Amino acid sequence: MRRIGAFAVLLACALSCASAAAQQQARSDGVYAATLVARPSARTVEIVFGSSVAHARLRERMPAPRSQVLASTDNANRTYAFTVSYRMTRCPPNTVLIAGGSPAPAPSSSIGHGECRYDFTVDRAAADRIALAFRVARQDRSSIATRVVGRFSTARTAYRRGEPIDVRVTMTNPTGAAAVQREVGCNRFTFVIYRDGHRVAELAPAAQACPVGFTPHASGASAEDSVDVRAWGNIDAPGRYRFECRYTTRFALPGAATYGSRDGSARVWDRVFTGSVVVDVR
């Protein structure tokens, strides 16, 4: 799919921020094609995208959507992705979402296979308005794999200068806990390094292309991931090092569609494991 231009709309609710014509349009919920204009007028609405303010003239309302999904994107269910698709071959590059006359953040958009897709990121209050206005179910996240425990370790407590120092995280799903899926692939570690109590200047590990997917994590099973911590700082000088470790991953229920599914963001649960490891370098 190729990306096309899109922008946000923040439709004012007060008389001082919108014209009477704009207020009339705001009473009709939907996604509208729009045209950006240089100056405000009685026929325009004020829009905000990023840190910029502009003005747009609403044009035709988009037809009935082919599909629409409203799915949570965080564990606390504070933010949601509203994805709406239309069966069209020519997609308006600029659109305005109106739901109950209240603001909606900027959509991104894409074209492919005779479909126009618009993705809005909204907060919980806006998600509730969208659910009511568009008659779409709000899909919330629920906790998964909260009993999985992560512990950090190294193979030894002392290393010679220049030796690899692999930090390992071991994730254990306790016996009796539900089987889950765990997201794997790419680097998921971050470190803050101290030598003799003083923080070591951070290095940025080189980014690498890598596959990402989910793998089963059975009840009672353990899984490991490891990385050479030297990519995060200069550990050649002798001394006692403390590595403050952080590992991020996501879990899902067995068989849950998490990739390629537009509600996949509501089917996962983010986990962050933290800990520390101390080694001597001589």
Image (cartoon, helix red, strand yellow):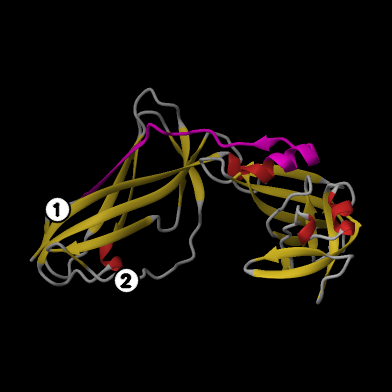
Q: Tag 2's secondary structure?
A: loop
First in sequence: mark 1 vs mark 2: 1
**Which residue is situated farthest in the bottom direction here?**
38
Residue 203, disc: 2
Is residue 18 within the magenta segment?
no
Question: Residue at image x 80%, y 56%?
Answer: 15
List x then y, in percent, for residue 228: 28, 61
Count all numbered tags in the image, as a single digit.
2
Where does label 1 land, which residue? 156
195 above or below 147?
Answer: below
Question: Residue at image x 12%, y 53%?
Answer: 157
List x then y, in percent, for residue 106: 69, 60
Instruction: Work out whether residue 112 can be spotted.
Output: no
Q: Which amino acid does label 2 sit on?
A: Leu
List x then y, in percent, for residue 210: 48, 61
Mark 1 or 2, closer to the camera:
2
